[in-house]
Amino acid sequence: MIKQGFTSNQLSGDGGPVALTSRHILGMEGMSPIEIRALLDRGHMFADNPHDSISDALRGKTIINLFYESSTRTRVSFELAAKRLGGSVLNIAVAGSSVKKGETLLDTATTLNAMHPDILVVRHNCSGAALLLSQYVDAAVINAGDGRHEHPTQALLDALTIRRRIGRIEGLKIAICGDIANSRVARSNIHLLGTLGAELRLVCPVTLLPADIENMGVSVFTDFEAGIKGCDIVMMLRLQTERMAGTETPSQREYFNLFGLDSGKLMRAAPNALVMHPGPMNRGVEIDSGTADDVEKSLIRTQVEMGVAARMACLEALIARSQ
Amino acid sequence: MTATRFLNAHLFDPSQSIDGLGYMDITGGVITAINLGTPPKDRTIERVIDCKKAMLAPGIIDMRVQSADPGSEHLESLPTLLAAAATGGITALACLPNTSPVIDEATTIDSLCLRASRIGGPRLYAYGAATKALAGNEMAELGLMAEAGAVGFTNCTSSIHDSLVMRRLLAYSHMLNKPFIQHCEDRALTHEGEMNEGETSTRLGLIGSPSEAEVIIIDRDLHLLRRTKARYHVAHISTRAGIDAVRKAKNEGLTVTADTSPPYFLLNELAVSTYNTAFKLSPPLRSEDDRKAVIEGLADGTIDAISSDHMPVDRDAKMQPFGPAQPGASAVDTLLALCLTLVHQGQISMTRMIESLSMAPASILDIEGGTLRPGGAADFILFRPQSSWIIAGANFISDSRITPFESHPVQGLVDATYVNGLAVFTRD
């Protein structure tokens, strides 16, 4: 869905908030390359000026972080992003709230809606939950992760991280490795990086590969070293504890052996290949500490830093759209 | 014993190959004459009804309905279910035993059927639970339930998983000469599943149930059937592989039958793309190839019957994210109109369609109805196949108003439904 008629000036990072076609940010699927580039440009600028007050777009605005799953980095990152733009932030962690007493997602939504927030940032363990919520509230909704579906701001911060280091995304060979089946990060990155012209490879055990994913414009590898061969970026995904032993993978030891990243395997990638991970990491399961902490090769800390900038661009764009 | 003549009707009865303008006489709830052309003068006729060229066909026999009553009457009571069925042209329906209490003994069959006959309207039949409390382990009192009128046995919405239990159930049903109705789904493959597995489930991040789960159970049961010789019926068949297996078994001479429901020949998995929980059904909506296979199966008779698969669902259970939402939808109100879609599209003949809604289920369950033969019960409908309307759950007679066909335009409207010669529904 490419909206025609934008001039580059309207959309550039310096030109103020990004104009979005949708009033929510629920996923990267369907977001136009123009919008994605504009959000990245704007995020770039926020990242360049982390402490200057470039925009107070959220002054007088209320942002509610509604998290049904535990999260440290995403929640803090949204909070910081909102505060840097002058907004007031309310955090609702589900443990200890009325949700535990059996209140449904939609009842919670209605209750929160009555408090007139401007933006609702929601994370939920069910795919489609953010979309459902967006149909019942007046606020703009940002999907901060819905089940196995999407985590759009993670993809934006990943792309911003790559752009700041390499300067482009188009033409890069990027391997996304690990638990693809259960990863919303993988899906959002497939949409975003694919839309911007990266060559995408998925590398994972066949038991963690969802059906027909080749149709999403990616190539699939079950041999780790073949999969990352010649790649500019190796993006590792977290393996959930409950999947480390059972019928998806036999053991942590075997998983690390076949699909974990260490400096030896990384040699197969392109000479200056960079390593990414959305966090939190399982050291010694999908990635070894030497690789994760290698300041030359690992972008993992930059990813966290870019999270704030990318989310500032999203929050600002939604507030601008609602006015 | 009033003699009534239905005049100027477009008679349509696949069981007698009747298709044309004519008349039908009934007396005392029994069809006494049916003929094409102008009727002879008959002084014994006391009442004449001009059908104005509406189609007069055997009443619909809906062989798969879930009743929320007893147990969850707040979702739908028996009187509303029967009234909704009558509106949809259904003259007989067979209820699954997954009520509360479960229909796993003779007295519960008696009680449900007795209540239905007191309420009046369509005839109500009940299946008996194949296993006690539907737990899948111990055989229920099939013989006593058969004596009380059970038209078949089923474990409702789950397959019998233990192959030994299944073997014995088939053998015992055969001894009682009652059909065994199986919902075919290998739960080991699907217990986490949220929709059909494929590109759509991958895009939506929903856990996929592989379509092979259906044919795995069918294949196992067919192997057992060769040994036990029973009347085996596959409920709401939805996959190409399952249909192929049934087709081969029929060619081999096994006593296998199957039914399907409108969602499986009118919709596919892409409908789930917006996470709309009205499209969450069991079995899940399948691929386009499966949908085409269902139509082919209906056309060539591999799939004998069409049932509504009516299931009252609590609105709150649907106002959820897709994963935890309850499967199921209301369906008796819309059965005929949705089926006629395939006729209007030229994919299935009217003969085959009416047969699959009446004669076929009557024969599978071995109950009366499904025909307009003189001497049979006067269970029939008057309908106008071309009348168009738009499906709106809010207008359903059923208390349960969730339908995957909300806002669908359809053609085919029931004018009147007769059971035992009495109008149980007439449109004003």
Image: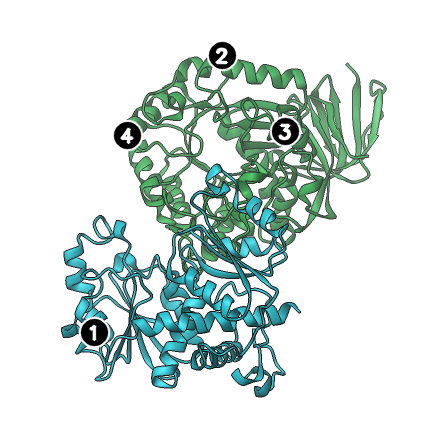
Which residue corresponds to mark 2? B107
Q: Which mark is residue A226?
A: 1
Q: Residues within 10 Å of mark 3 (few under 14, many from 20)?
A: many
Of the pair A11 and B296, the residue shown nearer to us: A11
Say which chain tag 1 marks: A
User: Decide: marks 3, 4 in contact (CB < 8 A)?
Assistant: no
**Image hue for chain A:** cyan
Looking at the rendered structure, the secondary structure element under dot 1 is helix
Q: Which mark is residue B81?
A: 3
**Image hue for chain B:** green
- The type of residue carrying mark 4 is Arg
Which residue corresponds to mark 4? B227
| Above or below: residue B211 compared with residue B382 | below
State how far apart marks 3 and 4 are (Cα). 39 Å
State the residue at coordinates (30%, 75%): A299
Tell me the quarter of the picture where residue A238 sits.
bottom left
